[in-house]
Amino acid sequence: MERNAFFNAIKENTLTGAYLLHGTEEYIKESAVASVLDRVDDAARALNVDVLQSAAADALMLAADALPFFAERRVIICRALPKENDAKAIAAYLPKMPPTTLLLFVVQGDADARLAFVKALAKEDRAVMFAPLSEGEAARWVGQLARRRGVTILPDNARFLVNLAGTDCARLANEFEKLACYAGDGSEITKDMIGKVVIRDLDFIVFSILDYFLAEKPEDGFRALGAVIKDGEKPLDIARVLGDKAKLTLEARKLIDRKKQKDEITKSLPVSPGYAYRIYESARRLKAAQVPKLFACAKALAEVAPLQLTGRMKASDALERALLKLVAE
């Protein structure tokens, strides 16, 4: 099931049966869980909601078989997927589960698509993927935050906020809350406010620069680089972050070439799930001919600081020279 369709089903109170909630956008995923729980009456919530940390078949079926207490439904939140024997028993049980029970399997990161249990839920359109938001989706989500918070923000300013703060929803929600408090209830969040209040996410901005070059759009890449420097970021810091991302992209590409699974790769990267996803996608799109160029670029980026410190080259010039290795013939 598509993520927005799942939220619509929550709003319309039409969810029934079992669903799998997975993907690397943890903030939106937990928002979905919270929205489901909000539909359960406060007075009887403790009696009608169970949270299980493991998916043992006996315990899960016992919880799911119980009838709701002065409510329309019971909600079972299971924070794990069942292991092999339990998975078979639970899969056989689900068609018999009481219609008054809503069962959510909520796991961190992407579920292993090779598992029979995951395949069965996906086949029934009961697997909901919470992937990182694109910049456009994140900007629209900011608009939703504004409506719920009682402030206004123009679409262009929502995009400007995303360009500064990135698409990680936990970070974006935090920056937006600061803006809403700064603006005041009923007020408009302006571009000037965003520039004053929001902490720039250099990692996100650098991703955009690197993506331009890897997409063979060096003019756009240099334009984005110039804008970041104009906004006050130091070339040395940009080079450091670019170098880190280049090395991680190469590492992810190596694992892809070794036929490692996406979830295994993203979990092995020492960054947040959202950034790990972006690194994986960059690595996946990397052409074979670009691998040695990215390696040369990463090496040149590591030389930016020594060149600046020894006075042999300005950091900005060394940074541009390193990026040119991505488009060299």
Image (tube, helix red, strand yellow):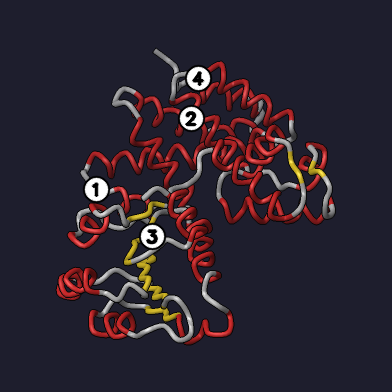
The kind of residue on which mark 4 rests is Leu
Q: Residue at x 27, y 41 (%)?
A: 256
In the visual, does 249 lie left or right of 258? right
Q: Residue at x 51, y 39 (%)?
A: 134
Binning the other alpha carbons within 10 Å of mark 1 as few (below 14), some (14 to 19) or many (20 upward) gives few
The kind of residue on which mark 2 rests is Asp
Q: Tell me the quarter of the image containing the C terminus.
A: top left
- Secondary element at tag 3: strand
In the rendered image, is residue 309 in sight?
Answer: no
The kind of residue on which mark 3 rests is Leu
Residue 221 in percent (x, y) is at: 56, 23
Kindly check if marks 1 and 4 are in contact, taking CB atoms under 8 A apart as contact.
no
Circle on res. 324: 4
In the rendered image, is residue 20 in sight?
Answer: yes
Circle on res. 260: 1
Q: Earlier in the sequence, mark 1 or mark 3?
A: 3
Mark 1 and mark 3: Cα distance apart in space: 23 Å
In the visual, does 317 lie left or right of 106? right
Circle on res. 211: 2
Residue 235 in percent (x, y) is at: 65, 33
**3 or 4: mark nearer the eye:** 3
Mark 2 and mark 4: Cα distance apart in space: 14 Å
**1 or 3: mark nearer the eye:** 3
Residue of label 3? 21
Mark 3 and mark 4: Cα distance apart in space: 42 Å
Q: Earlier in the sequence, mark 1 or mark 2?
A: 2
Q: Which residue occupies the foreground of this view, 206 or 28?
A: 28
